[in-house]
Amino acid sequence: MPVRAHITGVGGYLPERVLTNRDLERIVDTSDEWIVERTGIRERHIIAEDQRTSDLALEAARQALADAGIEAGDLDALVVATTTPDMVFPSTAAIVQAKLGVAGFPVWDIQAVCSGFVYGLAQLAGMMEAGMFRRVLLVGAESMSRILDWTDRSTCVLFGDGAGAVVLEARDDGEGGVLGSVLDADGSHRKLLMAAHPHPGASPDAVGDAPDDAPDLQVDAAGVAAIEMKGNEVFRIAVTRLGEVVGRVLDHCGMDESEVDWLIPHQANIRIIQATARKLGLGMERIAITVDRHANTSSASVPLALNEYYRAERIRPGQVLLLEAFGAGFVWGANLVRWSKS
Ligand code: UT7
């Protein structure tokens, strides 16, 4: 049997505070009806004032380690996928490592925005297949509420905060594990969805010459960036690219749609998820859906959905999971996993 990365522990954490669509009606000119109809979102969790992304990551990490029955000191590597790091540097992964009270193995962050977890899973599985690591922790953690313009109804209703994590262990004794991944990107679309660099003095020039129709970059007095998005254009390209990439990852692994038991999609918009499900010919009972309660938690959304369906015992050993995500850049990708954990 080939060496593969098996998911042996799963964890998730959502901050306590819940912000409903009705709450948002008091902040911007929106309605619960509009948000539910256009996105499927009903509520989202918001990080507490005294929490940082690393705190959310830490909770999810601890849960995943406990679920795998290992200690932080048993790890060979720790990776955090995030687009809302605690600081420019050090990495959030280094901060989480310190908070876990361990050292002596490599740590790094991945910045692939909403695709960070899918990118991280592909990267770490490849490194494990090559024999570099035996036990690693991958976390997707975000505090998206910190980079929102709370006066912009077209973006502030879409995002939420949270963290999800998996422990991966290299094994050569079974059919399961990460079967394969496909990653892709097209930076020519970078101006359709962006947030300026979050350090004071960051220049809009950093993203190059903006075309006339590009949104103006918003950086507040403290130098904090806000998300800007041309939502309907992002939507159109996301549906097309995700429809392609799910086919590509199946081809890559020599499998077809009928072998997929679960779609674990990035949770940006229920209509994007439904379009991908239609492409795969999967009924909605085979799709992990958390967008209604979590909104878009960027790199945390896939592991949070995985955590929820795993803990509800919906995902069973031997089943095939298709993970996919699409985010700013644009960067997108998909992983196929045969579940080996009971
Ligand atoms: O995770 C990374 C990728 N991100 C995404 O995948 C997000 C992709 N995009 C989307 O999910 C959707 O495009 C949105 C949910 C953002 C928007 O839905 P849409 O159906 O594309 O609406 P739209 O942007 O075309 O706007 C339609 C109308 C506009 O009004 P007019 O110009 O038709 O009068 C907007 O001003 O809806 C208005 N609108 C709102 N109305 C009430 C925009 N935001 C809101 C709001 N409440 N929150």
Image: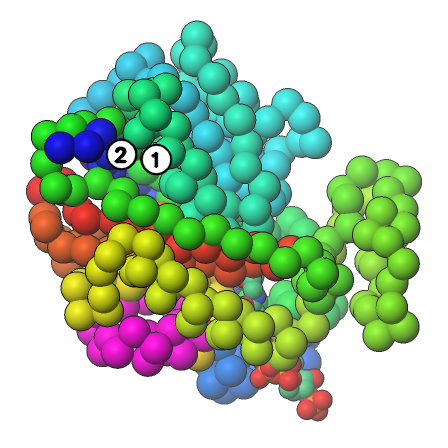
Q: Amino acid at mark 1?
A: Ala
Q: Tell me where residue 57 appears, x and y as whole percent.
A: 45, 35
Label 1 – label 2 distance at C-alpha: 5 Å
Give the answer, above or below, for where 280 lies relative to 68.
below
The three-letter amino acid code for the residue at tag 2 is: Ala
Percent from the top left, x then y, of residue 6? 22, 36
Residue placed at 59% from the left, 41% from the top?
A: 111
Q: Secondary structure at mark 1?
A: helix
Mark number, residue 125: 1
Q: Residue at 65% across / 76% down in the picture?
A: 233
* SS for callout 2: strand
Give the class, few, some or many, for how many residues have Cα within 10 Å of label 1's Cα (few <14, many ≥20): many
Magenta span covers which residues?
272-291
At a point 22% along the width and 40% down the height, the residue shown is: 177
Chief secondary structure of the magenta portion: helix
Tell whether 18 sits left or right of 193.
left
